[in-house]
Image (cartoon, rainbow, N blue to C red):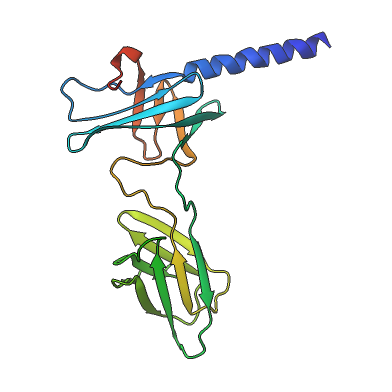
Amino acid sequence: MKYIKLILILFFFGSCSINKSVIGLYGKCKKNYLACTQIELKSDKTFEYFIFMDVGGGTVVKGNWEQISKDSIKLNTFEQPKNPSTTYSGKINPDRIDNVKITIRDFELPLAAAFIEINDQNEGKAADVNGITELKAQEIKTITYHYIGQKETIKIDNQNFNEIEIIVRDLDLNAVPSFLTDKIMVLNNGKLFFNDGYSLKKTNLKNRQWK
């Protein structure tokens, strides 16, 4: 019994030491900077994410952080998308032969000029001003859309659908993100790494650039 208590105590203090090493400010900005990115991970499991761009000034995005492993954390902003996932509906039109009609939109507007590919092909077609495109095909397995730097592939359950309407998730198209949802960041040697390999080095809190 004593050994079990000892193990639990060691585990508790080990967990605390790991969390303590994570807490702090990441990213040191140069004097007279034109661009700056910093993240402060606080002891109450909240964070503040500061992004400054010469055009637009500074923005602070706030949320919660969670340590999911010894070297990884997960970020979720307080503000989250109203429509977090992409959905679709489909039907079979017997009058439509050897082609499919795809309509793509968000909750408010059609995604005009969204580029649509089907069945993992490299060829596709852009949607018109109403978010509609027609492509030659006898069956659909997947639909991939590209829109202002965003890309997503949707798996179609019924391959015989030849008229499909897609309602895309809320897209964060701003230079400064409005929300982060389950964003994973890796910790290694005092650096916080983004998915694309970009990293912020841990620095003294006195270097924080926002109030």
Q: Residue at 36% of width from left, 30% of height from top? A: 49
How many marks the image carries: the answer is 0
- Say whether residue 160 is left or right of residue 133: right
Residue 77 placement (x, y as % from top left): 44, 36
Q: Residue at 35% of width from left, 14% of height from top? A: 205
**Residue reaching furthest to the left:** 32
In the depicted structure, whether residue 209 falls above or below residue 88: above
Q: Nearer the viewer, residue 126 or 167?
A: 167
Q: Residue at 45% of width from left, 61% of height from top? A: 153
Q: Which quadrant of the figure contains the N terminus? A: top right
Residue 27 placement (x, y as % from top left): 32, 24
- Say whether residue 201 is left or right of residue 70: left
Would residue 42 be visible to someone looking at this image? yes
Q: Nearer the viewer, residue 45 or 162?
A: 45
**Residue reaching furthest to the front:** 108
- Say whether residue 16 is left or right of residue 41: right
In the depicted structure, whether residue 80 falls above or below residue 204: below
**Residue reaching furthest to the right:** 1
Q: Which quadrant of the figure contains the C terminus? A: top left
Residue 95 placement (x, y as % from top left): 48, 91
Q: Nearer the viewer, residue 58 or 17?
A: 58
In the depicted structure, whether residue 58 falls above or below residue 207: below
Q: On the image, which quarter does residue 131 sit in?
A: bottom left
In the depicted structure, whether residue 45 falls above or below residue 86: above
Would residue 204 be visible to someone looking at this image? no
Q: Residue at 48% of width from left, 80% of height from top? A: 162
Residue 69 placement (x, y as % from top left): 56, 29
Q: On the image, which quarter does residue 115 sit in?
A: bottom left
